[in-house]
Image (tube, grey):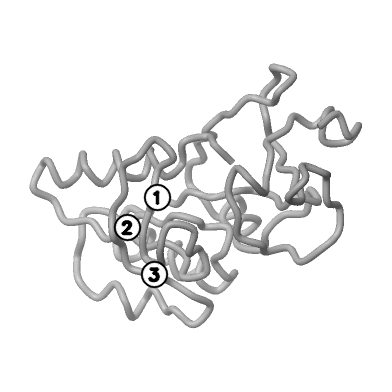
Amino acid sequence: MNAGKSTAMLQVAHNYEEQGQTVRLFTAAIDNRYGVGKVTSRLGPQRDTEVFDAETNFLEKIDQKIACLLIDEAQFLTTLQVQQLHQLAQVRGIPVISYGLRTDFRGDPFPGSAYLLALADDIEELKNICSCGKKATMNIRVDEHGKRLKDGEQISIGGNESYLQACGRCFYTDSH
């Protein structure tokens, strides 16, 4: 949350395209905060993208050579889709760069994220800061009154009004 994942993705796409190279961008169809099929940075930049859902087959969708495949909200990938992306990178030689959260508001890994962490050739962590000043690695879901929620569905789309970033200490001690 708030680490600049979407901003970084938009910058990578821009860098490739500035060199005349073709990229394809995908985001989760479930993420409709700014409209379906839009990658939006909290800093303002926005771009239309293709969408994926649980039925998307990336091996079929990516049928031509491209310079790079970029995935936002990668925590919503299925384990099969992560394997497909890994195959695209390893067999077809298409660089795949994905951006997403590791864990949900309970501290449980998203299945897609767990497989991404297991299969990734390289991992770069984008950092954010907890309100106490330490590196934030966790997310806390809050209700409309700012009260922490500890139960509920793993997937609930929301932004700054629904989630806070926290370090492990604040996450476990309810310091928010």
Residue 31 percent across, percent down from the top left: 50, 63
Residue positioned 29% across, 58% down in the render: 94
Question: Nearer the N terminus, badge 1 or badge 2?
Answer: 2
Residue positioned 65% across, 56% down in the render: 114
Q: Which quarter shows the N terminus?
A: top right
Whether residues under marks 1 and 2 lie with C-beta atoms below 8 angstroms apart, the answer is yes
Kindly state the secondary structure of the residue where label 1 is placed: strand
Mark 2 Cα shell of 10 Å, populated few (<14), some (14-19), many (≥20): many
In front of the other: 147 or 20: 147
Decide if residue 91 is on the left or right side of residue 75: left
Mark 1 Cα shell of 10 Å, populated few (<14), some (14-19), many (≥20): some
Q: CA distance from mark 1 to mark 2?
A: 6 Å
Tell me the kind of residue under disc 2: Leu
Circle 2 sits on which residue?
69
Tell me the kind of residue under disc 3: Val
Q: Which mark is residue 97?
A: 1
Q: CA distance from mark 2 to mark 3?
A: 13 Å
The answer to whether 165 is drawn above or below residue 143 in the figure is above
Residue 159 percent across, percent down from the top left: 58, 48
Circle 3 sits on which residue?
51
Residue positioned 49% across, 75% down in the render: 53
Determine the image quadrant of residue 84. bottom left
In front of the other: 171 or 94: 171
